[in-house]
Image: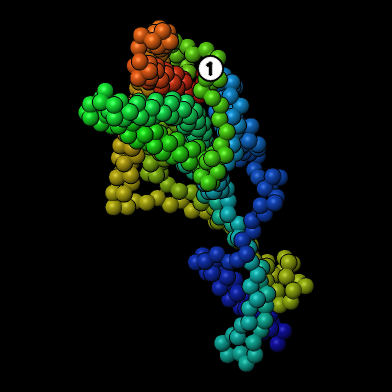
Amino acid sequence: MQALILKEEEKLKKAIAITLIAGFMTMNIAPVLAVEEAQKSTAAPKQFKSMVKKNKKTNDEYKYAYVNMDWWKNFNDENLNNYIIKAIQNNYDLKMATLAVEEYYQQTRAQFANELPTVSAGFAPNLIKMPGATNTTGAFAVPAFAQYEIDLFLKNRDKTKSVKKLWEGSQLDERSAYIAVASAVGTTYLNIVMLDKIINLQDEIVKDRKEIYDLMVLSHGEGLASTADTVRANKAYVSGTSDLIELHKQREQMLHQLCVLIGESPENASSLARTSLDDLDFTGVIPSQIASEVIVQRPDYMKAEKMVEKAGIDVRVAKKEFLPSISLTGLALFNAHDLGSIFTTKGMLALLGGSIMYPFFTGGSRFANLRLRKAEYERILQNYYKTNLTAIQEVNDSLVSIKMDREKMTETEKQAKLEKADYGYNEHKYNQGTISKLDLIQYRENLLSIDKLVAQNKVDCLVDYIGLYKAVGSKL
């Protein structure tokens, strides 16, 4: 009788073991053992820390290094510096760029997990009725399952390196975004300052044209001016007023744009402080030529280089897909009729096995994937060459613009001095009574017009400096 009971227990154990093994082969048994997020600082593998986490940013200081705040101080404008800082802190495009870096970082971590073994464990209470038996038997099982793909050919390692290149590329995209936003803030701010100056000058022109028109109306009433002259004066006044309205519209739109760049509501546009164009003075040194070492530090150039490296790794991975996969599988099962004796060796079943799998036929997908990766590599390599030429072009274009606009600025300033001297002579003539007030007002409009041109040329030069700053990746 005792032997019969023992035999039944052995059958029961075998049935439970077979059932659980089959279940493990077809599904995951929850819960999965995982390291909690709160423990990740101490539980992460050392290899992973050295590969990825050592470069993860811990504060925002690197963002200010991206935009080279020392260079922006050359404008000697605290308002501009404050807007650059606000953009770094509040601009939504920059926040998205930083979050994109975090996304790629987590993708790198997820891919690295494929290099590690997976372990699953669970708890499985059972109620079993054997064939021919009149009663049911309860049992408790704690199964644990482990699987590991031996990365003998370093295929998974290469996949991790490939994803890591995307993470590194996202960091360079982040740097590009900060430089682009800082450049946009600077350019928009300078154009607003220029419009402030030009609007003041245009307002003076409109006042003068209104005075000319009023004088023409009086002269026409006295029969000293023709109707055609009066109409022309009125047309000039209306045209000047229309130009003034357009300038106001442009300034309001740029103020709204600046608000968005610094992360504020456009409703606050009227409260944005700025410096007078006359007080704006750039004291930095702009080089006449740029060394090639600076060009290769541009973030887009460096990213193109990273993408070439990634494409090369992807080709290597595609080749390794032709190699077999080697896996280890382990199973541990603790089984007992009561919870108190569940972890004893009496009710334990262990299994360790290995496998070598080779895909003999995949319908040509591996060959197609290899050719695809090679084509991608060639395309990305060509983009790298193009990025190199584009970088050189943009730097040279910026240097040419700076040189030519400086020369134009010099000539415009000479013209402004001559116009100012001419106005002084005519003002003297007016005081002596040799020319009319109408003539003097027209000479004054010429002076105001050339002052507008000086303001535009000055800002053009300053914007050219920002263009060079952007072209060299802020390395000025």
Q: How many circles with numbers are drawn on the protein?
A: 1
Q: How far across and down, in percent of the image, does residue 26 sit? A: 50, 66
Residue at (77% x, 72% y) in the render: 340
Residue farthest along the right direction in this orientation: 340
Q: How far across and down, in percent of the image, does residue 242 sit? A: 34, 35
Q: Is residue 401 visible?
A: no
Residue farthest along the bottom direction in this orientation: 134
Residue 417 versus residue 313: which sits nearer the camera? 417
Q: Is residue 365 above or below residue 126?
A: above
Q: How far across and down, in percent of the image, does residue 154 sit? A: 49, 39
Q: Is residue 269 visible?
A: yes
Residue at (46% x, 27% y) in the render: 200
- From the image, which quarter does the N terminus lie in? bottom right
Q: How far across and down, in percent of the image, does residue 193 sit? A: 49, 28
Q: Residues within 10 Å of mark 1 (few under 14, many from 20)?
A: some
Amino acid at the residue labelled 1: Phe
Residue 233 versus residue 450: which sits nearer the camera? 233
Q: Secondary structure at mark 1?
A: loop
Residue at (60% x, 57% y) in the render: 119
Residue 81 versus residue 226: which sits nearer the camera? 226
Residue 363 versus residue 170: which sits nearer the camera? 170
Quadrant hosting residue 411: top left
Q: Please name the residue that numbered disc 1 is placed on.
A: 282
Residue at (38% x, 10% y) in the render: 433
Quadrant hosting residue 426: top left
Q: Is residue 100 above or below residue 348?
A: above
Quadrant hosting residue 31: bottom right
